[in-house]
Amino acid sequence: MRIALIDYGAGNLHSCSKALERALAAENRAGEVIIGADPDVIASADRIVLPGDGAFKDCRDELGAVDGLEAALHEAVRVKARPFLGICVGMQLLADIGEERGETKGLGWIPGRVVALDPAERHLKVPHMGWNTLEARGSHPILDGIPFGEQALHAYFLHSYHLIPEHAGDLLAVAEYGGPVSAIIGRENIVGTQFHPEKSQLLGLKLLRNFLSWTP
Amino acid sequence: MSLKARIIPCLDVKDGRVVKGVQFLDLIDAGDPVESAKAYDAAGADELCFLDITASHENRGTILDVVRRTAENCFMPVTVGGGVRAVEDVRALMLAGADKVSINTAAVKDRAIVGRAAEKFGAQAIVVAIDAKKVSGANEADRWEIFTHGGRNPTGLDAIQYAREVADLGAGEILLTSMDRDGTKAGFDLALTRAISEAVTIPVVASGGVGTLDHLVEGISIGKASAVLAASIFHFGTFTIGEAKRHMARAGIPMRLDGLQP
């Protein structure tokens, strides 16, 4: 299995790459993680992962600045329907519009907007930073075997904005933080996490394993 | 369901080697920061903090290698601070694999660096480290001032006002150290911690003075911090991360207990 981990100057490539390798090993799959933005790499990949750390606008600009990257992603994900995982801002970029530091157009793969967190309880701090549990909103292979409720594992969040999908069915899991915070989204061959699976230890590893064995 | 309080062990790194590293395990190389980081990752720490205290400018690149190797070996978030002077330093650390970068003296000298770094990397990645000392007399209202250079140099800046200012500029977190308490094991300066936590809408990490597990509890329950940072009580094995988390959970603080070692 060839996993393309997209390098566009924004995102924790080292951690993501190692976490994906660990997931490959745990799944007993032969495979490799290829870091890059080369259209040939993306075209020949079985799985595509888009990380992203930083401000929406900045990440969007960086993505757009890599020659041929958007076209290659569009071809692989939208036309050939290869399984795709977006992480943090790499997930937010899938929306129509991001509102961080002015309105910026996203890739428009998941109808929706990326808006500022606004927890109802005033004592709750923003950024939403640290470990929180998840609550499933639907069933999806990416959620298989991840415990929710009383025995829930934790996911690591580090963000001030989140993606509100236009279609409620695209929201697979939320975290509670003065109201629901979009934690996992999914539509067709695309999934995305607001939290960092590569930093989320047990839960993160399980989610990445699910992603590798998922056949949309 | 809720966000949990965090426990953050902090490692001082000089020229790529740990000063006062993990002593509680027989590590193959106790001076290797990555070995210590892996030990804390396995022990269930919620985040890790590296403080680079390398003095010479030529050796500053050593921290990048440490961060890179840690990011490759640990599945926990890492904050790096110490010697960050420019947005370029932030970028280098982020690309090496840091999740957050902490800015201290550079922000005191030029507040605008906070805004520039947050604009580039997002508020969530930018921590401002504040070293504060109480300067009010016995019969005065509490007042704390920002100090630099390990508490030696006063700046004349009021700590609460400064915290508000950097939060407005786009800092995503404040790492607050009481220079009066640092190294004393007498507990956090709770009045300071609470004053800053209540003055800003971003998370505050309490630091300086932890000697007992109850001190950790108080930092959250009385100081209203979102996280507690400690060094020696963990490095010297006085308490394990697991003991600390269970103690805090028993005291009613929401903690993440996933996969904890006994």
Image (tube, rainbow, N blue to C red):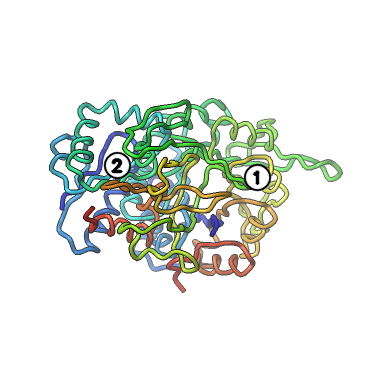
Q: Is residue B221 above or below residue B137?
A: below
Residue B220 in percent (x, y) is at: 63, 56
**Could you say whether the residue bearing mark 1 is in a helix, strand or loop?**
loop
Instruction: Name the subunit of mark 1.
Output: A
Q: Chain of mark 2?
A: A
Label total for image:
2
- Mark 2 neighbour class, 10 Å CA radius: few under 14, some 14 to 19, many 20 or more: many
Which residue shows up at 32% across the image and 33% down it?
A: A107
The answer to which image quadrant residue B131 occupies is: top right
Which is more toward the observer, A96 or A207?
A: A96
Residue identifier under label 2: A50
Disc 1 residue type (three-letter): Arg
Residue A215 can be seen, yes or no: yes
Classify residue A109 as left or right of residue A115.
left
- Judging depth in this view, the residue of A91 and A34 nearest the camera is A91
Q: Residues within 10 Å of mark 1 (few under 14, many from 20)?
A: few
Identified at 58% across, 61% down, the residue is B254
| Res B59 seen here | no
The residue where tag 1 is placed is: A122
**Most distant residue in the bottom direction:** B262
Marks 2/1: CA–CA distance: 33 Å
Q: What residue is at 45 percent from the left and 59 percent from the top? A: A154
Q: Nearer the viewer, residue B229 or B257?
A: B257
Q: Is residue A3 left or right of residue B11?
A: left
Query: In x, y percent, where is residue A38?
Result: 17, 35
Picture quadrant of residue B76: bottom left
In the rendered image, the vertical position of residue A207 relative to residue B201, given as above or below: below
Specify the amino acid type for callout 2.
Leu
Q: Quadrant of the N terminus of chain B?
A: bottom right
Asked which secondary structure carries label 2, the reply is strand
Circles 2 and 1, Cβ within 8 Å, touching? The answer is: no
